[in-house]
Image (tube, rainbow, N blue to C red):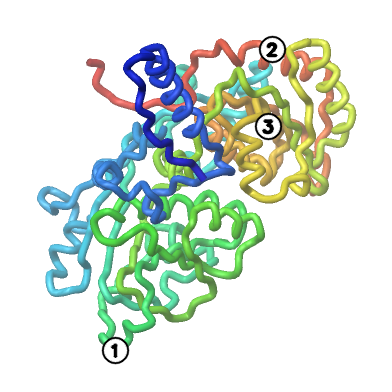
Amino acid sequence: MVKILKPVKARPQKPFLLIFILLLVPSVFILFRLETLKDVYEIRGDGSDSSGDAAVQKTRSHKLGGRSDAWLPIVVADCDGLDPRSAPCLKATNKVSNMISAHELVYRPFKLAIPGFINETQKEKWVEAVMHDAGLQNRMMLRVDEGKAVYPAQFGQNLVFENAPYTGIPPPDLWREDSCMGGGAASHKQFLNPVNVSELDDAYEALVIATVPDSWSWQHFLDRVTVIWSQAMLGAEDSFKGDNITIVSGREPQQRVNELYEIMRVKHVHRVSRAVAKKVVFSCRAPLIHPFTSQRFNDLIGWKPTPLKDRNVVLMMPRSHSRQIMNQDELNNRVEALLRMRGKDEVFQVFDQDQFADMVDIITFMRDRVKMVIGPHGGAMYNIRFASPAAVLLEFMPTQRFQPVFWETARLFEHHYYFYFCESLNAQHNMVIEDLNEVVGWIDDILNAQEHSQLPAVEPQYDWQV
């Protein structure tokens, strides 16, 4: 706990003492403010001392002082000129309902840098894979000559209902068009029927609907539940208090997901067939890929970046089952030998989540220590979200199981990203790196370029050349 420093009166006959105190007190204050993620989470609305006038002003402006502030969506509350299906127009046509707040969120267009490649052949294979990926083609346009992928403006909705029931719709954990962030057909209509006052005695204060597909899993908690929470919190200052939020999702989550809920400092309930809340927050209409909803989660949990010069770990993330690199041990030995030869105090480490006490330890380690992550495509790579900007991710991908998720993730969090296709050897998509000398030399080049690269990972897209 931070101690309050009592003011000290300087004696007139000793002016040097006053000067000493004036220099010392700011220094002590700065040291106390250098809090780590493990020591404190400055979550907006967590009931801490940040609830004074300054915090209220910060909340009203939607700014947290973090990286996501640069990507804040435009919040529109007026129906004039909007599509009749937009949030303000839904409220305008339901004037006698219990919909007390309806905001349309306009997310700015942006560009992601395409990966770095070891040669032109690898680049051509990646471009071909992207062109055959329907999901990518639906959400972005690839500009190979520019080295960018352009994502258009997107829309989200925050709807808040008063004294409303949740009765299992949208359905949790199912990959359907009508599930929350599962498609475009998630319905809010069940919340338009207010409950009787007699049902409010045991009601939740504010219930955020996050019944996304596979909400229990590490992967889809991070790529969907965190998006909903980040978007929903934009309405907290207008309709509900952040410290009273309860998130409802599907089945009981995995351990690491429960630990993330603890870091978020929100209550959460699961497998709920019916619940009543004084405020129901419906943010299921949210963009899957955007810098704001990605970076906002880190800002909300109090994450602060560590400079690249203070990070020295090159982290290998191997796999123990499908998509294994069959010559992984030799790759490990070669990379470790490379780091010794470089003589830059870089440390080689193999990632093992069981060596960490909890997600706080993992997040702190990724943020404060890691400069590069190497490995085959796999769920552990989601931890790149918690690395400080300008980290490197080098991903080995089996040719028969292309997935672009970590390219998008790494770029959204302002990291360098490199891609390498390996032939799928079997149904488990195990791989062999054929030319280890070439790959290890490439890793050396990547590390040398890391501190000097000026290529932005993510940047705004704007058509007019002003």
Q: Are marks 3 and 2 in contact (CB under 8 Å)?
A: no
Q: Amino acid at mark 3?
A: Glu
At mark 1, the secondary structure is: helix
Residue underneath mark 2: 445
In which quadrant of the rendered view does residue 365 lie? top right
Going from N to C along the chain, the mark reached first, 3 or 2, is 3
Q: Amino acid at mark 1?
A: Ser
Residue 198: numbered disc: 1
Residue 108 in picture, x, y percent from top left: 31, 36
Disc 3 to disc 2, how far (Cα)? 16 Å
> Which is in the foreground here, disc 1 or disc 3?
1
Residue 66 or residue 274, whichever sits in front: 66
At mark 3, the secondary structure is: strand
Q: Is residue 456 visible?
A: yes
Residue 190: numbered disc: none
In the picture shown, does residue 253 fall above or below 276? above
Q: Are marks 1 and 3 in contact (CB under 8 Å)?
A: no
Disc 1 to disc 3, how far (Cα)? 56 Å
Disc 2 to disc 1, how far (Cα)? 68 Å
Mark 3 is surrounded, within 10 Å at the Cα level, by few (under 14), some (14 to 19) or many (20 or more) other residues, namely many
Q: Tell me which residue sits at (62%, 54%) in the image.
A: 218
Residue 395: numbered disc: 3
**Quadrant where the C terminus lies?**
top left
Q: Amino acid at mark 2?
A: Asp
Residue 408 or residue 254, whichever sits in front: 254
Residue 433 or residue 333, whichever sits in front: 333
Q: Is residue 334 left or right of residue 170?
A: right
Picture mark count:
3
Going from N to C along the chain, the mark reached first, 1 or 3, is 1
Residue with the most extreme left position: 80
Q: Tell me which residue sits at (53%, 71%) in the image.
A: 270
